[in-house]
Image: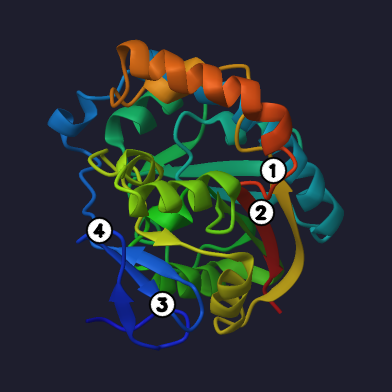
């Protein structure tokens, strides 16, 4: 069995044949494979529901992230790379502050983003970046947890960031309310919520789950200094129904029952840890 990418301890079997955990530092990984340009995999996704369910919340969250970046970036810092830029929502928000470039591995989404006026390169990081190309800010919004070679990706960030440049990681948290609840339900014999949070059977599943502690350790070992961290809302009433049904895993009465339960529980859920962490690091 492979060793932990954070602390090098041995990984142990997790809650599914494809899931593994590190008892030493709490890192969680998986063997789920990406099918990002597989049209059959994309056929299961309702893109209209996906956009309606995510766009409003993500753009609000992106504005919060950009305000934090603006406080921390060097005054002369003007270039930003958005890795996994998808439809270009973050690029659009960032355009007022930075010369912003995106990289998107999904060729169809990258092409549409270019048609919408965004500077987006089709491909993967770091191969889509020139060897000598450097940026003041590199951002991964809900992306770093999808990259199998995450250590190599973070080391590439060191190479492609200017001195005192910022690495911004916006990603799901293994200490969040919904993720912890999904693990309890999986142990009780209902694996569906756990599989959904790993995005199993979707074109680009999660391959990592971090807490703030083990994520910071991974970054520090790559010579990054943590500047700030904060949580963002992981669920809002607006767009919730579309978000729950866009992957096609819920329908009919099950969908409506779970939707109504989550809607009723939202005020209480906000008292617990969020499922989204943002960590901003500086390249010294």
Mark 1, secondary structure of its residue: strand
Mark 3, secondary structure of its residue: strand
Task: Check disc 2 and report the residue beneath it.
Answer: 278
Q: Nearer the viewer, mark 2 or mark 3?
A: 3
Which x, y percent locates residue 264?
63, 21
Mark 4 and mark 2: Cα distance apart in space: 27 Å
Which x, y percent locates residue 174?
52, 58
The answer, for residue 272, to whether it is visible in the render is yes
| Near-viewer residue (216 or 175) | 175
N-terminal of the pair, mark 2 or mark 1, is: 1
Q: Could you say which quadrant of the image residue 47 lies in?
A: top left
- Point 38% across, 53% down: residue: 146
Label 4: few (<14), some (14–19) or many (≥20) C-alpha neighbours in 10 Å: few
Q: Which mark is residue 187?
A: none
- Asked if disc 4 and disc 1 are in contact, CB closer than 8 Å, the reply is no
Mark 1 and mark 3: Cα distance apart in space: 26 Å
N-terminal of the pair, mark 4 or mark 1, is: 4
Mark 3 and mark 4: Cα distance apart in space: 14 Å
Q: Which mark is residue 22?
A: 3
Mark 4 and mark 1: Cα distance apart in space: 28 Å
N-terminal of the pair, mark 3 or mark 4, is: 4
Quadrant housing the C terminus:
bottom right
Of all residues shown, which one is farthest toward the left? 40
Task: Check disc 4 and report the residue beneath it.
Answer: 16
Which x, y percent locates residue 134?
57, 63
Mark 2 and mark 1: Cα distance apart in space: 7 Å
Quadrant housing the N terminus:
bottom left
């Amino acid at each position: 069995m492979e060793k932990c990418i954070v602390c090098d301890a041995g990984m142990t079997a997790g809650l599914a044949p494809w899931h593994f955990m590190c008892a030493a530092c709490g890192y969680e990984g998986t063997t789920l494979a990406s099918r990002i340009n597989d049209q059959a995999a994309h056929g299961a996704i309702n893109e209209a529901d996906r956009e309606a369910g995510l766009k409003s919340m993500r753009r609000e969250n992106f504005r919060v992230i950009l305000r934090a970046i603006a406080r921390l970036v060097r005054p002369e810092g003007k270039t930003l790379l958005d890795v996994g830029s998808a439809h270009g929502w973050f690029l659009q928000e960032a355009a007022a502050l930075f010369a912003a470039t995106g990289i998107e591995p999904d060729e169809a989404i990258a092409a549409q983003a270019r048609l919408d006026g965004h500077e987006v390169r089709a491909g993967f990081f770091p191969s889509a970046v020139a060897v000598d190309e450097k940026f003041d800010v590199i951002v991964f919004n809900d992306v770093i947890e999808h990259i199998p070679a995450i250590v190599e990706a973070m080391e590439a960030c060191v190479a492609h960031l200017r001195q005192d440049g910022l690495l911004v990681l916006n990603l799901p948290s293994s200490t969040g309310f919904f993720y912890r609840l999904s693990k309890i339900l999986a142990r009780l014999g209902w694996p569906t919520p756990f599989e959904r949070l790993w995005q199993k059977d979707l074109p680009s599943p999660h391959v990592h789950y971090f807490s703030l502690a083990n994520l910071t350790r991974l970054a520090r070992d790559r010579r990054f200094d943590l500047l700030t961290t904060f949580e963002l809302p992981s669920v809002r009433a607006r767009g919730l129904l579309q978000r729950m049904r866009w992957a096609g895993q819920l329908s009919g009465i099950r969908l409506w029952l779970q939707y109504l339960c989550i809607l009723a529980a939202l005020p209480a859920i906000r008292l617990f840890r969020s499922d989204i962490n943002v960590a901003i690091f500086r390249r010294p």
